Amino acid sequence: MFDIAYAMGTGGGGAPGGPGGGFASLIPLILMFVIFYFLLIRPQQKKAKEHREMISSLKKGDRIMTSGGLHGRIVALDEGSVSLEIAEKVRVKVNRGYVAALLQGSSGNPAAKTEKKSDNGKSDELKTK
């Protein structure tokens, strides 16, 4: 009976408490950190840097979209906020951090509507009945 207890004791070759056991158990944790860094942390930092650069390069006349979904043209800039014209004579003030995207065709009038005219001067929408 005591022979079995001796066999289960802490002696012998590959015991977990040996000299190389502590470092070998850290390798999976280090590997997981490296994977998380390249898959999660680094892309998020890169996206945040691009967003900061986009916000700092805003200028009057740019068409933007806010994170709330408002589309408008910048009419005034402050250090921490942006004034948007979302319709003719309708202006809202938005914090710069909430600017989500710079839209294509940035220097145009958002209220200007272009309508396609046919040969006889009537719009195509009225012509197709």
Image (tube, rainbow, N blue to C red):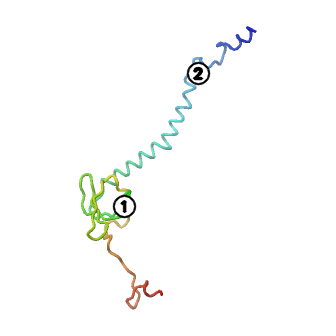
In the depicted structure, whether residue 47 falls above or below residue 37? below
User: In the rendering, at what x and y percent does residue 82 appear?
Assistant: 28, 57
Give SS at disc 1: strand
Count neighbours of disc 1 (C-alpha within 10 A) and say few if under 14, some if 14 to 19, many if 20 or more: some
Residue contact between numbered discs 2 and 1, judged by CB atoms under 8 Å:
no
What residue is shown at x 35% (from left), y 56% (from top)? 99
Image quadrant in which you'd find residue 59: bottom left
Identify residue for label 2.
21
Residue nearest the viewer, comparing 20 with 120: 120
Identify residue for label 1.
65
User: In the rendering, at what x and y percent does residue 112 appear?
Assistant: 32, 74
Image quarter of the N terminus: top right
Image quadrant in which you'd find residue 71: bottom left
Q: In front of the other: label 2 or label 1? A: 1
Give SS at disc 2: helix
User: In the rendering, at what x and y percent does residue 22 appear?
Assistant: 55, 22
**Residue pushed farthest top?**
2
Type of amino acid under label 2: Gly
User: In the rendering, at what x and y percent does residue 123 appear?
Assistant: 40, 85
What residue is shown at x 38% (from left), y 65% (from top)? 104
In the depicted structure, whether residue 50 falls above or below residue 15? below
What residue is shown at x 56% (from left), y 31% (from top)? 28
